[in-house]
Image: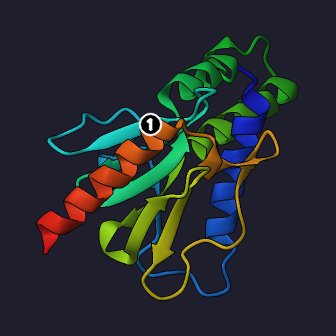
Amino acid sequence: MRILPQLVTCLVLVVSACGRDEPSPDMHLAKNAGTANAGAELGDGDVRITSVDGGVDLALIGDSISGGLSEKTLSKVRSETDTGAVKGTGFGADIEKMVKGTVQSALTTRVAFPLTSIKDVRYDGRKIVFEWNGTPRMSGSMKTDNKDVLESFSADDAQRFVDAVHARKAQAR
């Protein structure tokens, strides 16, 4: 698995979410806390799907949908950016620790939306397509390996995710 495409994807998610002129009040960035956690336990009806290459995931947990780097990718990044492994002292070591700490912090950020912000979701045979209530929550498409992130899940997983969202929305009515 190549880490760089997943890192770029996560940074694009964060930048596109933060860089909106008018941030959506129901969109938030979560630092692996609560229901947005990549490693959070799944409850009844919750679902998490991971891209075919294992780099990113999309989750329906409770009443929110979140996306970000998968737990497998996060573990690899954590080991590669472990500030405890920095050798030496002085200015250079301090900069290395700061950079690695910043990277770890940024990459554990997940974009999350409440289920109520989604009008519908479907799998069109190629990718997962979200229809939003009101203004789209994210502009542009996010890519990994020159492919839209929402195209990176297997057909079976994508349909399982869509079915879970529909079931959860039906429960909420």
Position of residue 14 relative to residue 160, above or below, is below
Q: Left or right? Give the position of 84 relative to 57.
A: right
- Color theme of the render: rainbow
Q: Left or right? Give the position of 87 relative to 55.
A: right
Q: Residue 94 lies in what quarter of the image? A: top right
Q: Left or right? Give the position of 6 relative to 145.
A: left
Point out residue 157 in the picture as x, y percentages from the top left corner.
44, 38
Q: Which residue is mark 1?
A: 156
Q: Left or right? Give the position of 31 relative to 150.
A: left
Mark 1 closeness class: few <14, some 14–19, many ≥20 residues within 10 Å: few
Residue at horizontal 42 percent and vertical 83 percent from the top: 133
The residue closer to the viewer here, 56 or 131, is 131
Residue at horizontal 47 percent and vertical 78 percent from the top: 132
Q: Amino acid at mark 1?
A: Asp
Is residue 59 visible to the viewer in this orientation of the structure?
Answer: no
Point out residue 138 in the picture as x, y percentages from the top left corner.
60, 71
Helix, strand or loop at label 1? It is: helix
Quadrant where the image shows the N terminus = top right
Point out residue 156 in the picture as x, y percentages from the top left corner.
44, 36
The residue closer to the viewer here, 8 or 129, is 129
| Residue ranking furthest to the front | 125
Point out residue 57 in the picture as x, y percentages from the top left corner.
50, 39
